[in-house]
Image (cartoon, rainbow, N blue to C red):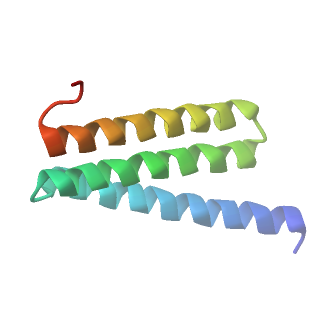
Amino acid sequence: MTVGTLLSLAIGFALVCVVLAMMLCTLRLIIGPSAQDRVLALDTLWMCTMLLALMLGIRYASQIYFEAALVIALLGFVSTIALAKFLMRGEVIE
């Protein structure tokens, strides 16, 4: 088994795991009993999306996926902070 084949199998397995995690996060986002559960599921969902973009970038050797992962990470972080602030205070901008 060559290194390229092994890397391809590992990335394929990781892609399946991340997609499964995304489906479970979506399920928690839909049926979450509280707003905090939904925010946590959304936070995990954007992290999984970023990982998916990174793995696709490795698999297809394309820089655009890495740039998309960077944008997803920045937007996800800011949106998580905004949602947490909204849940704590009821407003985002003071």
Question: Residue 60, located in which quarter of the rendered image?
Answer: top right
Q: Nearer the viewer, residue 2 or 37?
A: 37
Compared across the picture, whether 52 is left or right of 46 comes to right
- The structure residue drawn at horizontal position 20% and vertical position 57%, both measured from the top left corner, is 37
User: What is the x, y in percent for residue 12?
Assistant: 63, 60
Question: In this rendering, is residue 75 above or below 61?
Answer: above
Q: Residue furthest top?
A: 93
Q: Residue furthest front?
A: 94
Q: Residue furthest right?
A: 2
- The structure residue drawn at horizontal position 34% and vertical position 56%, both measured from the top left corner, is 23
User: What is the x, y in percent for residue 47?
Assistant: 47, 50
Q: How many marks?
A: 0
Can you say which quadrant of the picture contains the C terminus?
top left
User: What is the x, y in percent for residue 32?
Assistant: 15, 57
User: What is the x, y in percent for residue 85?
Assistant: 24, 40
Can you say which quadrant of the picture contains the N terminus?
bottom right
- The structure residue drawn at horizontal position 36% and vertical position 49%, both measured from the top left corner, is 43
Compared across the picture, whether 93 is left or right of 57 comes to left
Question: Residue 44, located in which quarter of the rendered image?
Answer: bottom left
Question: In this rendering, is residue 84 above or below 9?
Answer: above
- The structure residue drawn at horizontal position 24% and vertical position 56%, both measured from the top left corner, is 27
Question: In this rendering, is residue 91 above or below 29?
Answer: above
